[in-house]
Amino acid sequence: MKFSWKNLLLWSLPLIVISFFIWQGLFAPITNDNNNIANSRMTYGRFLEYIDMGWVKKVDLYENGHTAIIEAVGPELGNRIQKIRVELPITAPELITKIKNQGIDLDAHPIKNNTAIWNLIGNLFFPLLLITSLILLFRRSNNSTGGPGQAMSFGKSKALFQIEAKTGVIFDDVAGIDEAKEEFEEIVTFLKKPEYFTAVGARIPKGVLLIGPPGTGKTLLAKAIAGEANVPFFSISGSEFVEMFVGVGASRVRDLFKKAKENAPCIIFIDEIDAVGRQRGTGIGGGNDEREQTLNQLLTEMDGFEGNTGIIVIAATNRADILDSALLRPGRFDRQVNVDIPDFKGRLEILNVHARNKKIDPKVSLSIIARRTPGFSGADLANLLNEAAILTAKARKNQMTLQEIDKAIDRIIAGMEGTALVDSKSKRLIAYHEVGHAIIGTLLEDHENVQKVTLIPRGQARGLTWFTPSEDQSLISRSQIKARIMGALGGRVAEEIVFGESEITTGASNDLQQVTSMARQMVTRFGMSQIGPLSLENEGSNPFLGRGMGNSNEYSDEIAVKIDQQVKYIVEECYNKTIEMIKNNRIIIDKLVDILIEKETIEGEEFRRIIEQYTEIPTKA
Ligand code: ADP
Ligand code: ZN
């Protein structure tokens, strides 16, 4: 990016605006309070009358003739000479003549000296600020970029990349991802004692790719390696390249490696590498030259240093499948480490790490929390304990109890709590909807247990039914999926049966989305329909992301029609069964709704106790 006036303008505009406001705020009041001696005021019209009546004795003009302080006597003024302030709309020459004709003492006052200085400073303020910032800008870009022509680039106004001399993170701070940790211990040894490896001619990988969903601790792990080996940590995010102008990304990569070489041994961490490292030449959106240049530069740099220079490049992504294969070739990111969402044991370990610096009631069992949070990433768990700590402080408690932790879990899963509706038809409808979900969930053997039903809104939801998630979510049977579909349909079906078809609401849209998605996956991914055991769609195939464009779903139109038929068939079957169940249990449902409206929340235990008075609940697996 070359120097251009456009850039200069873009950069300086916000500064000018800011400095203008600062100036207004700081200096403008000072210029104004020069003649506040007169407390009483008079309109211009009244002033003219006073002149005509001969009551005005003296006129002093201020602010270039916009304000006058007059001395006048008159019956209205108790026949005493008083100073009065008059705002003059325009400095009319007639006024001056009039004053002179009446023989009134007239004086005009220039703006006071110190005011003039302030005004001068005010006027110089933003040019000075602008010049200073430009100097700073030039300095900064000269320090950090290689080559000319980079000075004014926009991207340069941000830090180029982050450098941490000491991350302070150690392996003990990372929990629940043991396999990944083991892989890295060897790298730490290499960084500390490269001679062990070079002596026997071993080549240490230059690049390690960490693959896993967001928040699983990839950055943390990379930092821990730097921390354990006591080497500097250079980091940059792939997404930062994409927003930049052509050529900036590549030069930034060059700078990054140059700096890293000067500081070797060290770790270079590239977060979200998929943003730059996506398959080249898929041509979506006309291709992205900037990205390709950046990627090429990255490949060049990685090839350019020897394995034993002591630089290790660690990159993170949640999608290795879309990466350009050139990146994965030997000598580049030839080692791949998976970092997954933690299981129960992992969650417990992570909770232990983050509980270290918190005051928690000894009665709280972290394993119960770990049990309640399947699917939570390390970042979610850290966030959970932090939320709970905030709630504890708010409640003026000195120890975190299960109550705050429960609240924090709910908040993270479903957003902030609102207040319940006042009793109304829509509150009843929501109550029926939620009870519909909950009763189906309770009466189906293959459905998870109800944890609680509530009418207290949260986030987008106006009422909620919570189910106790089962630990093992990896293998789910056909009847479990069907049970979930029926449970999700329960809300809408209850609305329909109680209030009639014309009264059903939009409240079920989210449920229906889930229903459709589950049914579709049964057909296209799990081979659970009459089409047979075929996999017709790839997991997570995304038509917007490069590879596999247009051919991720390799089936004919004929099959497409069949898929739709099967999806419809599954949903209809579940729907009819749900209607039957809701109808058969109408009395219990009415009873539950009354209780729910009164109490607003029913816990799972109590919910089941009420149902048991009427019907038998199957024991769950
Ligand atoms: P990622 O890079 O995978 O998106 P981060 O490393 O940025 O995730 O994780 C964010 C935060 O979540 C970390 O700073 C840490 O507090 C917490 N965290 C995530 N995973 C773990 C873990 N395995 N052990 C301990 N803390 C973790
Ligand atoms: Zn619902």
Image (cartoon, rainbow, N blue to C red):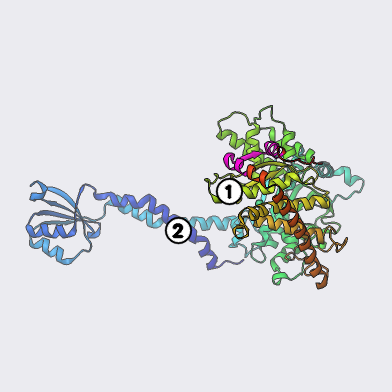
Q: Quadrant of ligand 1?
A: top right
Residue 573 coordinates in the image, percent (x, y): 77, 58
Task: Report whether the residue tagged 2 is closer than 8 Å to ligand 1.
Answer: no
When the figure is inspected, residue 411 is found, relative to residue 237, above or below; the finding is: above
> Are the residues tagged 2 and 1 within 8 Å (C-beta)?
no
Mark 2 = which residue? 17
* Magenta stretch secondary structure, dominant: helix
Which of the marked residues, 2 or 1, is nearer the chain's N terminus?
2
On-image quarter of the N terminus = bottom right
Q: Residues within 10 Å of mark 2 (few under 14, many from 20)?
A: few
Kind of residue sitting beneath label 1: Arg
Q: Nearer the viewer, mark 2 or mark 1?
A: 1
In terms of image quadrants, where is residue 108? bottom left
Q: Position of residue 566 (x, y in %)?
A: 80, 63
Which residue bears the numbered disc 1? Answer: 428
Rendered view: 497 above or below 324? above
Amino acid carrying mark 2 in the image: Val
For residue 503, side relative to residue 257 (left or right): left
The residue at 82%/62% (across/down) is 325
Question: Element under label 1?
Answer: helix
Q: Is mark 1 within 8 Å of ligand 2?
A: no
Residue 423 appears left or right of 483: left
- Image coordinates for residue 554, horizontal then vertical, percent: 83, 68
Outermost residue on the right side: it is 200
Q: Residue at x 16, y 60 (%)?
A: 45
Q: Which of these two is toward me, 482 or 252?
A: 482
Quadrant of the rendering where the C terminus is positioned:
top right
For the record, the magenta segment spans: 593-611
- Does the rendering let one see residue 502? yes
Q: Is residue 609 magenta?
A: yes
* Rendered image: mark on residue 257: none
Say how many tags the image has: 2
